[in-house]
Each structure stands twice: as structure tokens, then as C-alpha cells.
Image: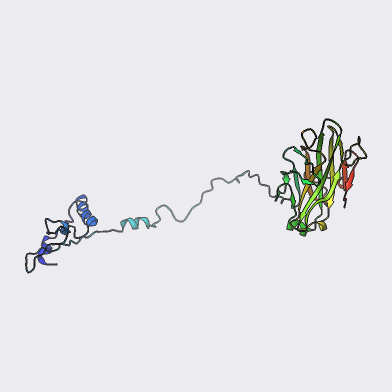
Amino acid sequence: MTKNESETSPVINSKLPDSVAGKIQSLYQEQGLNYISNNANIIPRDEVGNIVLQEQNDSNPLLIIDAVTEQFTNNSVLRVLDTQFKYFNFPARTTVIQEELVDLELDLDLNVQQQDAVFARYRPSEDQRIAASAEYSGIEINEVQDGLLQQKPNSYTITKELKNSGTDLRFRIKLQHRYDAPSGFGTAFFSIIKSSEDGLDREFRTFENTSKLHPTIPGSINQYEVQDLNVNIIIPNSQFEIGDVFGIGAKAGQNNNTQFHTINALQSYWVISDADKNVDLWNQEIVTNTTSSLQNSIEINTSPRILNREI
């Protein structure tokens, strides 16, 4: 930089008030160190902004570049990193606020029981008609009242843990059904349906009631009669595999506007439990000297007829 440049360069007086010095410096920060040279009144420029120079002319304008110095202090950093112990006295002293132990009154059950890997209690969520068909159709029994959830709707699925445990299953089924008709009698039949890799067996176990009014006709139920089918049966572990699915099936001889069979949801259920456990319908242990209440049985309020019974 020439002598003339240094004479024309502005100098920011460090004794100026901070606000004035900051205002002057802001121009350099916003427009660069040569912002004075951008003023056409100081250095002539053409229409496109180029500096106008004349050859072999000592009076050509010089580009003015001003140096700007900013001062930074580390006072703020030192204040943050100040680690002097201003709020502690040594040696340290302790004060006992309360000598008695505080009773937090935490109601914790440390004897949490794991969920039974077998037990489940299902029932229909609403009343439903029994379809008139030549083969058994699965009924809706999708409300989980207790125990295991249904991996598939209206069914009980054999898990790896259940199969490998060697546990036999106990099925306790109650189905209350009614026949509505202007006269005469109808027929209704029920089954346990098993679905496996070998296929679908709609008659894995079959059951039926027989009306006392028509004792020679299997599955008979008289006009407006209400029957309870009660089944208590063991399914051996050897008769199912991992992934097998069980359901409840039904079929009827009639289903039209004037003749139809209905399953009463509130009076029906399906309970699955460990066959070796002496438990009630809610998986609560039964304290008794005999287990006769859990012996295999088909309890029906009329003459029973059991098909494909393998217990």
C-alpha cells in the first residue's frame, strides 16, 4: 500500500464510544474491507462497475482497502469455566434431617405369577344362529374372558411350549341352544374341529343332544326347547402338534325364517386347561380329596349320544 493509500484510509479511533465504533465497523463487516472503493464518488467506475483508468497517467485512482481490527476477550469463557469452590466449606459436614425410616407405603406384589401357558376361557360375543349344512361349520366364540389370547379368531392354537411340555389338554365346553319353530322338532349337532398340516378335520370329536320327546332321533330338539350341551374331554398331547388349531363346530337340520336354532352367548363357554390340574372353570385350584369332578364326561340334559369318542 502506498503512502497516499495510508493517508486516505480511515482509522477507527479506539477512544470512540462503543456504539459509534461498532457502527463504523459494521459497514466493513457487511460490505467488505473495500467498501469505500465501491463509492463511485471516490473511485470512478463505468456502467458495469469497472474502475476507470487512463494509461500512462499518474493520477489514476488507487483501490482503497481498509484494515479492520476486532478485539475478542476470553472473559466470558473464563466465567463459564470458573471452578472455584465458592459454595462449599471443607471439611464437609453432614446433618441428619430425620432419624426415623420413611415408610414409602409401596404396595408391591413380589410374588408375581407367570401366566399359565395353557389356560384360556372363551365364549361367543353374541347370540348366533346355527347354519343348516351337511358338514360342521365353525361357530363364533371370539370373546376372551381369561387366559391366552386367540392367535386366530374363534380358535385355540397349540404353541411350541405347550407341545414340548407334554401336557394333555382338557376341553370343557358348554353350549346352550334353542330351537324356534311353529311346530314339530329339529336337529342340531356339535363338534371339535381340528386344523393341522394334515388337513381340516371337522369331526375330530362330535357330540349331540337327544330330546326326551323324540328319544329315537339323534340330535333332536323339540319346538321352543332349550338344551345345554356340557362336554368335559381330554385331548392327549400325542394327538396334536405345534401350530395345530382347534375350534368348535355346529350344524343344524333347519335354518330359515320360521325354523332356526340359536346359541345363547351368555350361557355358553369353552375352557381349555392342563388336564393334570384340578382347577375350576376360571383356573382356580379346587381343594378336594377327589378329582371325580374332572373325570372325562359328556353331560347332557337329555339322552346323550357321542360320536368318534376317543378319550
Horizontal arrangement in the rendering, residue 176 relative to residue 83 (left or right): right
Near-viewer residue (118 or 175): 175
In the orientation shown, which residue stands out farthest toward the right? 216
| Residue 159 point in image, percent of width and height | 73, 56
**The N terminus lies in which quarter of the figure?**
bottom left
| Residue 236 point in image, percent of width and height | 83, 55
Residue depicted at 73% across the width and 58% down the height: 160
Residue depicted at 44% across the width and 56% down the height: 90
Residue depicted at 87% across the width and 45% down the height: 298
Measured along the vertical axis of the image, is residue 83 above or below residue 122? Answer: below
| Residue 44 point in image, percent of width and height | 12, 59
Measured along the vertical axis of the image, is residue 193 above or below residue 303? Answer: below
Near-viewer residue (49 or 39): 49
Horizontal arrangement in the rendering, residue 30 relative to residue 128 (left or right): left
In the orientation shown, which residue stands out farthest toward the bottom? 56
Horizontal arrangement in the rendering, residue 188 relative to residue 158 (left or right): right
In the orientation shown, which residue stands out farthest toward the top? 182
Q: How many marks?
A: 0
| Residue 174 point in image, percent of width and height | 81, 41
Near-viewer residue (220 or 67): 220
Measured along the vertical axis of the image, is residue 216 above or below residue 164? Answer: above
**Can residue 219 be seen?**
yes
Q: Name the colouring of the figure.
A: rainbow
Near-viewer residue (168 or 303): 303
Which quadrant of the view contains residue 188?
top right
**Can residue 280 be seen?**
no
